[in-house]
Image: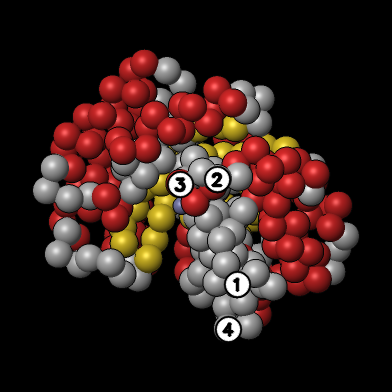
């Protein structure tokens, strides 16, 4: 059994064939799907997805850093409102993205901190999105670190030193399609990071693994990530699936 710890199954990219896409994932052994939020524009689509696959799909709630704009306080109020109404499995995805927009850095930092505090309040993990922003993310984690701060560094693409640093803040590393890329770099050192710190993800519809690089990604392709990790660690795919699913249970408490 494989667990996709980060997949945007509610995306419009799947509007025309979602049931078939889901069936391909089930057939490939992917049984659990953790669904990160982006902003209020997607909340209804997430709830509809959950209604369709209640035993398979586990929702997070949060404000994605690329959706942090002038109105971010209204968006955070929406997030908080959802938490008051019902249960989620993580606060995510949250963090800092300086690839798309550097002008919102101060807002992004505020939103990130505020959502970390929300996660602590509800005793939930955080799921971090980090793009061109390792220093800024670590700066926030350093001020917020505590025993009740834990989660996943999603789509981890940093160096060995950054991996160790993320782990030191109680974060697991979310490993996806990038590990199969020729210039993805993390495949070179990943076997020095114990498997207990690793979870698998697709981030579909983005970041499809080889041999589908550049195409629409989907959760069934998690099997290619698992296969690559089995080569990197020199253990069977069954063992990778079992350990990373176990790790996902430790984080999400389900
Ligand atoms: Zn994502």
**Helix, strand, or loop for circle 4?**
loop
Residue 205 rendering spot, x and y as whole percentages: 53, 55
Q: CA distance from mark 4 to mark 3?
A: 29 Å
Tag count in the figure? 4
Mark 4 touches mark 1? (CB < 8 Å)? no
Q: Label 2 CB, ligand 1: below 8 Å?
A: no
Determine which residue is flagged by label 2. 16
Q: Earlier in the sequence, mark 1 or mark 2?
A: 2
Disc 1 packing (10 Å; few <14; some 14–19; many ≥20)? some
Residue where numbered disc 4 is placed: 183
Residue 74, label in figure = none
- Residue drawn at x 24%, y 45% is 111
Say which residue appears at 55% left-offset and 54% top-offset.
204
The numbered mark, 3 or 1, whose residue comes first in the sequence reads 3
Residue beneath the point at 80% across and 44% down: 27
Check mark 3 vs ligand 1: CB closer than 8 Å? yes or no.
no
Asked if the residue at tag 3 contacts the one at tag 4, i.e. Cβ–Cβ closer than 8 Å, the answer is no
Foreground mark, 4 or 2, reads 2
- Distance between mark 1 and mark 2 Cα atoms: 21 Å
Query: 7 left or right of 106?
Result: right
Q: Hey, which residue is sitting farthest left in the picture? A: 70
The C terminus - image quarter: top right
Tell me the number on the disc at residue 12: 3
Please tell me how crowded label 4 is: few (under 14), some (14-19), or many (20+) other residues with Cα within 10 Å: few
Q: Are circles 2 and 3 on residues that touch, CB within 8 Å?
A: no
């Amino acid at each position: 059994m494989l667990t996709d710890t980060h997949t945007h199954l509610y995306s419009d990219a799947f509007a025309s064939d979602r049931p078939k896409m889901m069936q391909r994932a089930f057939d490939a052994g992917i049984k659990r799907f953790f669904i990160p939020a982006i902003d209020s524009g997607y909340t209804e689509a997430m709830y509809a997805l959950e209604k369709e696959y209640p035993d398979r799909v586990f929702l997070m709630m949060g404000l994605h850093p690329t959706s942090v704009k002038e109105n971010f306080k209204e968006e955070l109020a929406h997030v908080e409102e959802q938490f008051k109404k019902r249960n989620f499995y993580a606060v995510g995805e949250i963090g800092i993205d300086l690839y798309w927009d550097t002008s919102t850095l101060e807002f992004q930092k505020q939103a990130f901190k505020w959502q970390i505090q929300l996660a602590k309040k509800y005793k939930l993990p955080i799921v971090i999105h980090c793009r061109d922003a390792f220093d800024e993310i670590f700066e926030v984690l350093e001020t917020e670190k505590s025993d009740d701060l834990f989660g996943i560094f999603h789509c981890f693409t940093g160096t060995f030193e950054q991996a160790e640093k993320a782990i030191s803040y109680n974060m697991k590393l979310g490993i996806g399609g990038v590990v199969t890329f020729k210039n993805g770099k993390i495949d070179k050192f990943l076997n020095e990071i114990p498997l207990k710190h690793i979870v698998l993800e697709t981030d579909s519809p983005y970041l499809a693994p080889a041999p589908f690089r550049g195409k629409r990604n989907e959760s069934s392709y998690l099997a290619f990530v698992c296969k690559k990790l089995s080569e990197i660690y020199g253990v069977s795919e069954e063992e990778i699936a079992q350990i990373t699913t176990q790790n996902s249970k430790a984080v999400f408490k389900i």
